[in-house]
Image: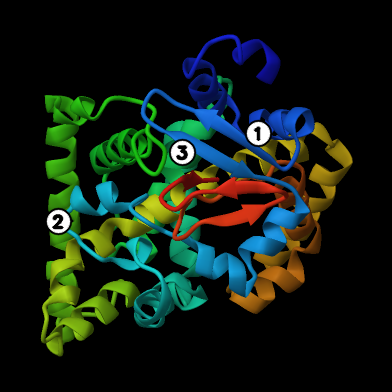
Amino acid sequence: MARMLSRLPRLGDTVGLMLDPTFYLFEKYLRHGPVFTVKTPYQTYTVLAGADAATFMSSKEGRECLTVGSSWRFVEEQFGGRDSLVAVDGPQHKQWRTLLQRGYSREAIAGRYAEAVDVIDDAVDKHWKPGQSVPVLPAMQKLSIAQVGTFVGGVRPTDNDIEDIALVTRDILKIAPVQHIPKFMLRLPRYVNARSRMVGVAQSAIALARGTQAGEGPSQSALLDDILESCADDPDATNQRNMLFHSVLPYFAGVETTSATATYALYLILKHPTVLARIQHEVDAMFATGDITHDGLFQATPVLHGAVMEAMRLHPIASFIIRVAAQDFEFHGHRIRRGEGVF
């Protein structure tokens, strides 16, 4: 695929990255080695590939040479944010992670596994009709959005909300962190209206969380609780400015990877009937015991857990990260200049 698409200047790399970025970059790595470039109509990126690249990325030198840069700035600007969790490095990033980590941890779903099953049952009843063909990835995306909204976003999204959130995240991720389409596409009414409705969902969730703080019912989102609490002592208004963006960030941070992994896992499980039978047996036994807990879930379903892990190994979703060179440096004899975009 890489050789064929390379005959299309700039456009070839764009198509390859949109179709199957992992396979495309791996093919280029086999052809060109640990350092090569990919070119889109909007920017040229230097790719550092292989085990040495992974080691370099996590080393002290790598952390000094590479920065998050402006890769995610466009995303946060869509929701009025600046210097948010995904757009800063160093101590400021660590501070954000400390503030927001509870909302992204297992605590977000603690004591709510029955509700999670209800969300799944509802999605299956609507989108997985017996006897009908199901486009699995879009169906998994809808389920992921429903669960993220319910347990992290602070409100269970309606079917229309899910469609809007899916459209907005899909279109934004075609521009950032790697631009595939012109930015004017996000000025079209279908996107602008969907984003406005998505903002409305987030604002409703924030209002609900404020009510929870005032004693009006149980908490629906540890993430929103912590965001609101951080705004009480916020002298430079940084937390306040990023409140809306951090409220919708979970839809960008987890839906695509989760739904793609679940799709591959389902494919592999159905491809191996003996594994499917073992999973059905252990899941039936788990539900027969009554309430589901986090520890009990993983203890009771080792085959299911192993199948998901194997899907992640065979079909890695997040195969690269995007950084900007903070200074000139060398990698495998190649000089990378300050300001270059780096995969």
Residue named by callout 1: 25
Helix, strand or loop at mark 1: helix
Is residue 99 in view?
yes
Q: How many marks?
A: 3
- Find residue 233 and report its horizontal and vertical position in percent: 15, 90
Mark 1, other Cα within 10 Å: few <14 / some 14–19 / many ≥20: many
Mark 2, other Cα within 10 Å: few <14 / some 14–19 / many ≥20: few
- Viewport quadrant of the N terminus: top right
Helix, strand or loop at mark 3: helix
Q: Marks 1 and 2: CB-CB under 8 Å?
A: no
Is residue 1 in view?
no
Mark 3, other Cα within 10 Å: few <14 / some 14–19 / many ≥20: few
Instruction: Give residue 80's quadrant in the image.
Output: bottom left
The amino acid type of the residue labelled 3 equals: Asp
Q: Which mark is residue 125?
A: 3
Task: Name the residue at 57% across, 57% down.
Answer: 329
Q: Marks 1 and 3: CB-CB under 8 Å?
A: no
Q: Nearer the viewer, mark 2 or mark 3?
A: 2
Instruction: Give residue 304's quadrant in the image.
Output: bottom right
The amino acid type of the residue labelled 1 equals: Leu
